Amino acid sequence: MSHLSSDVDITEQINKRLFLNKSIVIHWFRQDLRLTDNPALSEAAKNGLLLPIYIYDEKNSGDQHLGAASRWWLHNSLSELNKSLNGKLSVFSGDPKIILSDLVDKHNVTAVYWNRCYEPWRIARDTQIKKELENRNIEIHSFNGSLLWEPWQTLKQDDTPYKVFTPFYKKRYLYSVPPREPIAAPAKLDLCDCKSDKLSISELGLKPTINWHDKFIPLWKVGEVGARERLSAFLEGELTNYEQGRDYPALKSVSRLSPHLHFGEVSPNQVWYASKFLESSDDQEHFLRELAWREFSYNLLYHFPALPTDNLQTNFDSFPWVENEESLRRWQEGKTGYPLIDAGMRELWQTGYMHNRVRMVVGSFLVKNLLLHWHQGERWFWDCLLDADLANNSASWQWVAGCGADAAPYFRVFNPTTQGQKFDADGEYTKRFVPELKAMPNKYLFNPWDAPEEVLNKAKVKLGTDYPNPIVDIKLSRLRAIEAYQFLRDQLSTIDS
Ligand SMILES: Cc1cc2nc3c(=O)[nH]c(=O)nc-3n(C[C@H](O)[C@H](O)[C@H](O)COP(=O)(O)OP(=O)(O)OC[C@H]3O[C@@H](n4cnc5c(N)ncnc54)[C@H](O)[C@@H]3O)c2cc1C
């Protein structure tokens, strides 16, 4: 027995020495958890023994710690990536500056490769790491693996960034050269790992401690294979009714690619070219336009790094938001008494996703009918969405609140009753998430407070007991919102004059 263990020791030492002598290049996975169309990985793979790493960096992220739903996704996505790397993904937790420096100290690292990220805190961190490693003669190679075009490539004629979507879209999408074509996964990966230092993925502690995430399991196939399957299924099926269907939350007409795109399990280039490969149609054009909104959000975040916190239109700084814990809690729990709002908020909680139209309606309700600060909605979405994305979430909340670039006009207050009647006319979506209204006739589904007593009795709904009474009067709260926005304009004109 002792003979055997000393043999093992010797083999390990030999391996270690071999490992130490060989030059190593690191591919640092971040928002690019895939092997195909991964420009940094493909280049790294050409240049020697490859050490693929992931660093869970909670401390450097300022206020943007990963939300609970994102942590669940990340845990699963890393596990899938590790499988496709034959278990060779080395996973760490902590400050990447220290971890990378440590790896350089211990091993013969000659270069580090990564795909660029665009969150302001990541840009600051990466810039510092690049400087420090280059000072130690380590080559740094960074690539674009997350966007169709770099944000600094799409500027107005006067070299300032676009704040309005349509001209951005026209310049970038309609009149420019096509984006980079996707590349295949590296044909060969000569991989190594650092067994002694790395953690297991479970040790990152990303899996939520309470079991609310179990319900996500049948709904999502996390990872690169899942992303590819989702994309194919969408292009072969749901895309054919995208233009019309994308507004109806009960229909399967959207791609549900957003978490896959966020974590980089599929690149926008892969999505773009896979859709372009099909015969052109209005559905295809509309879908590509949505991808362009993603690029626009990243463009805003890059050029206006305070987007997650500061109103892009600074006149909103004096907006009279109210504080109301009770309203916020009822909005979060889907107990506002407005069935479409409640369906959306419960969809979010139960599936980690919410349909885009409903996101707009619940957002408008929070900031306009409840007059709660858009930060409150942004934070809740950040925690609950599987696709929580700093650029898309911040830009969209600013859009909803009216304080962002190219935002919804202040007088556009979505009416949750008419939105429900229009976009979920037969109540399929709403009844799925608000089952207590299952037996309500469609005529009163979105306004149960108008239903005569006998209708409520027949549907077995006692308002205030089985289903809440509305927390605000929709007409009065709309007027209050418009008054508040008017106040802002008056303030502005007083300052201006
Ligand atoms: C208040 C609010 C918050 C939002 N927060 C997020 C967020 O955190 N993360 C996120 O990815 N999206 C966010 N969105 C945008 C949009 O709702 C989602 O991208 C979309 O619903 C995702 O579903 P899908 O993949 O089926 O979209 P599809 O309709 O199939 O669109 C394809 C892709 O285009 C992009 N896209 C679509 N619509 C938008 C949009 N309006 N803005 C930016 N990109 C878009 C997404 O990457 C999406 O996956 C938010 C919207 C609102 C109104």
Image (cartoon, rainbow, N blue to C red):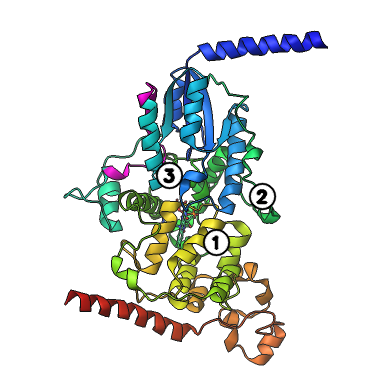
Quadrant field for ligand 1: bottom left
At x 16%, y 77%, the residue is 497
Task: Count neighbours of disc 3 (C-alpha within 10 A) and say few if under 14, some if 14 to 19, many if 20 or more.
Answer: many
From the viewer's perspective, tell me whether residue 8 is left or right of residue 169: right
Q: Which residue is mark 1?
A: 251
Could you say which disc has been placed on residue 203 in the image? none
Q: Is residue 208 in sight in this rendering? A: yes
| The stretch drawn in magenta includes residue 148 | yes
Looking at the image, is 480 positioned above or below residue 427?
Answer: below
Q: Which contiguous range is marked in magenta? A: 135-152
Upstream in the sequence, badge 1 or badge 2? 2
**Residue in view at x 37 percent, y 36 percent:** 128
As drawn, 25 above or below 476: above
Identity, as a three-letter code, of the amino acid under mark 2: Ile
Mark 1 → mark 3, Cα distance in angstroms: 20 Å
Marks 2/3 in contact by CB < 8 Å: the verdict is: no
Q: Which residue is mark 3?
A: 275
Residue labelled with disc 2 = 217
Q: Position of residue 229 (x, y in %)?
A: 56, 42
Q: Counting other residues with Cα less than 10 Å from the Cα at mark 1, is it few (<14), some (14-19), or many (20 or more)?
A: some
